[in-house]
């Protein structure tokens, strides 16, 4: 399994290819599982190769409400099958921090930043690097136990940061700091945060 580079008409293309190892190991279940895992990793590597991912055009206007769910990178996974990279390509902290310069935030803005509990310190660093000051947070109780190292995680944090002079909502428009909604698909957030 590998990545093959090809140049055609001045453009560089990358593609996955299967080597002879696949044919030799197809009868071995353990080797096949490893092969599938390697495919996932190579696909992630392929997606992050410079120049192969098209970035969406950022809006020309600025916004006073910013909502972000960074692709946090974890340093530890009990098994390779539980690695976050099996779900999506993650980013190291320094790259997430650098994204701040691309955020179309108004001079007075609020940031809602999702942070898994083990990434709280990093999330606070990101919030500051993006030019926001931490104000408070809410807890999403996912109502189902998940994975974890110290605790089996059942919640996620939604940090709130402000930039400039951004006022909190009127008292009658404020939500509870605890959001109770069962988790569904990987990385899908509760519906109420979109309203």
Image: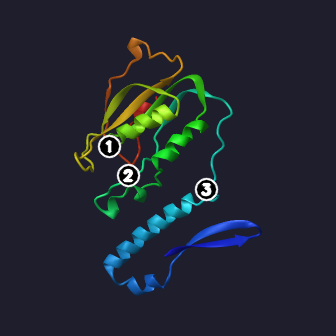
Q: Residues within 10 Å of mark 1 (few under 14, many from 20)?
A: some
Q: Is residue 110 visible?
A: yes
Q: Residues within 10 Å of mark 3 (few under 14, many from 20)?
A: few
Q: Please name which of the two marks, 3 or 2, marks the residue nearer to the observer.
A: 2
Q: On the picture, is 4 further left or further right than 157?
A: right
Q: Position of residue 14 (x, y in %)?
A: 61, 68
Q: Which mark is residue 74?
A: 2
Q: Residue at x 26, y 49 (%)?
A: 148
Q: Nearer the viewer, residue 184 or 59?
A: 59
Tell which circle, 2 or 1, labels the residue nearer the N-terminal end.
2
The residue wearing badge 3 is 53
Q: Residue at x 66, y 73 (%)?
A: 6
SS for dot 2 = loop
Tell which circle, 3 or 2, labels the residue nearer the N-terminal end.
3
Report how far apart the C-alphas of labels 3 and 2 lie in the structure. 22 Å
Q: Do tag 2 and tag 1 residues touch (Cβ < 8 Å)? A: yes
SS for dot 3 = loop
Tell which circle, 3 or 1, labels the residue nearer the N-terminal end.
3
The residue wearing badge 1 is 118
Report how far apart the C-alphas of labels 2 and 1 lie in the structure. 9 Å
Q: Residues within 10 Å of mark 2 (few under 14, many from 20)?
A: some
């Amino acid at each position: 399994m590998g990545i093959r580079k090809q140049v055609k008409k001045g453009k560089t293309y990358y593609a996955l290819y299967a080597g002879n190892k696949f044919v030799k190991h197809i009868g071995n279940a353990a080797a096949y599982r490893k092969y599938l895992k390697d495919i996932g990793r190579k696909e992630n590597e392929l997606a992050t190769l410079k120049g192969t991912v098209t970035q969406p055009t950022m809006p020309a206007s600025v916004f006073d409400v910013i909502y972000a769910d960074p692709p946090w990178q974890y340093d530890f996974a009990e098994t390779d099958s539980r690695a976050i990279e099996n779900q999506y390509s993650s980013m190291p902290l320094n790259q997430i921090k650098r994204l701040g310069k691309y955020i179309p935030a108004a001079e007075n803005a609020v940031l809602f930043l999702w942070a898994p509990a083990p990434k709280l310190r990093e999330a606070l660093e990101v919030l500051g690097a993006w030019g926001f000051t931490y104000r408070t947070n809410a807890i999403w109780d996912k109502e189902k136990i998940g994975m974890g190292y110290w605790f089996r995680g059942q919640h996620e944090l939604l940090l709130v940061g402000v930039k400039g002079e951004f006022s909190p909502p009127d008292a009658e428009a404020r939500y509870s700091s605890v959001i109770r909604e069962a988790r569904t698909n990987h990385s899908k957030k509760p519906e109420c945060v979109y309203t």
